[in-house]
Image (cartoon, grey):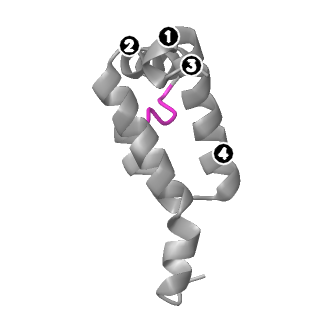
Amino acid sequence: MLKINDWNTAQRVESLRQMDNHLRDMSVGSRDIIWQKYGGGLKATAEETRENWERIAKDDELYLNALFYYMVATLEPQTLKSFGIK
């Protein structure tokens, strides 16, 4: 099993793309707010989005921040339920 720091840039970019798609499919509200900043959510153009994902993918700390935010964001539906919000 590869460690995350052994992943190349292309693997990291693809994982960011898949995380973004998953958050979209889950209808996570903060996808358009926090994910934009930390996870490289969609930008004005596909090229800008790709460049941002590559910027994040090349920096271990930025990539780990994106992974952490993704983990927290996927818990958003359960967190909101605990506050009685649907």
Total numbered labels placed on residues in the image: 4
N-terminal of the pair, mark 1 or mark 4, is 1
Q: Mark 3 points at which residue?
A: 2
Residue 35: tell me if it is visible: no
Which of disc 1 and disc 2 is earlier in sequence? 1
- Name the residue type under label 2: Lys
Give above or below for 85 relative to 38: below
Q: Is residue 28 magenta?
A: no
| Residue pictured at 38% horizontal, 13% vertical | 58
Q: Which residue is drawn at 41% across and 47% down?
A: 69
Disc with the residue nearer the chain's start (3 vs 2): 3
Residue 25 at x, y percent in the picture: 70, 51
- Residue 9: assigned label: 1
Q: Do the residues labelled 3 and 1 touch (CB within 8 Å)?
A: no
Q: Which region is colored magenta?
A: 39-44
Q: Which mark, by number, is residue 58?
A: 2
